[in-house]
Amino acid sequence: MKYGTGDAAVVVNVATQAALFQALRERFLKREGFALATLNLDHLTKLPRDPDFAAAYGAQDLIVADGRPVVWLSQLAKRPVELMPGSDLILPICELSAELSLPIAFFGSDVPSLRGAAQALQTRVPGLEICHIAAPPMGFDPQSDAADAALRDIAQSGARLCFLALGAPKQEIFAARGRSIAPEIGFASIGAGLDFLAGRQRRAPRWMRVLALEWFWRAMQSPARMVPRYARCFAILPGLALEAWRAR
């Protein structure tokens, strides 16, 4: 399913969770790295305004739908994709990593959150090996020499998978850079997922997620930051809906 137009267009190329985990298993067994992105409406507002972000999305190997509007648009276009929020993918990806004895790394957020997430995951996933934890300083530039050094550190740690908690567009740009500097590592951009696991941020209750109200929860938690973001998201929906209708 394609979203947007021109250089900012993005194709969700993995439609189901079963297909995603088949692709991950195959890449892990072949020692092939990857960049996994989770598309949402916020990304779709940023892509036309940020050529570096658009280029980074073009370098992603696996793109899934993160956000119900992205799923609804696919249904409108009669090209349905499953909802796969990054936060919900962390645990099953860790279970696959433990099954295959693949060490993992965390990069982003802050060290207390990463350590808290590591403890939570190792409690829930026996045999999970976390070999590298690093949090960049404020103002981190994912296209800098410091980013390249961080990628080399991740590669030298022995990690085969790295969860990125930098937020968009930094995490996707960093993952795209990692495809050339650390080609055997899988990079999964999961936003605030590790903060949720560590208890540093509260995720919306499950009933709100079922009713597609997670956006409202997040807006109430941080209105100054999130209300303008969601206003921009709602503003692009009519155009995206028209594109999806034409694609039927």
Image (cartoon, rainbow, N blue to C red):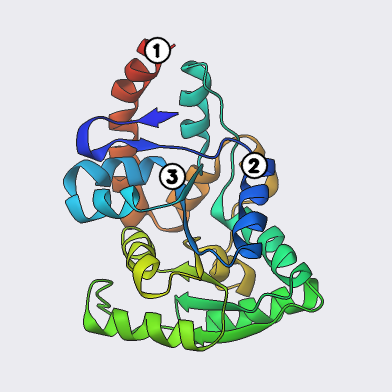
Question: Residue 199: x percent and y percent?
Answer: 61, 72
Query: Disc 3 to disc 1, how far (Cα)?
Result: 19 Å
Q: Residues within 10 Å of mark 2 (few under 14, many from 20)?
A: few
Considering the numbered disc 3 on the image, is that residue within a helix, a strand or a loop? strand
Q: 99 or 107: nearer the eye?
A: 99
Give the residue type that dot 3 points to: Leu
One can see residue 8 in this view: yes
Give the residue type that dot 1 points to: Trp
Q: How crowded is mark 1: few (under 14 residues within 10 Å), some or many (20 or more)?
A: some
Q: 123 or 172: nearer the eye?
A: 172
Looking at the rendered structure, which numbered label has been put on residue 245? 1
Q: Residue at x 47, y 83 (%)?
A: 154
Question: Residue 143: x percent and y percent?
Answer: 23, 72
Q: In this rendering, which labeled residue sits more in front, label 3 or label 2?
A: 2
Q: How crowded is mark 3: few (under 14 residues within 10 Å), some or many (20 or more)?
A: many
Give the residue type that dot 2 points to: Ala
Question: In the rendered view of the protein, which quadrant contains the N terminus?
Answer: top left
Q: Dot 2 corresponds to which residue?
A: 19
Q: 144 or 50: nearer the eye?
A: 144
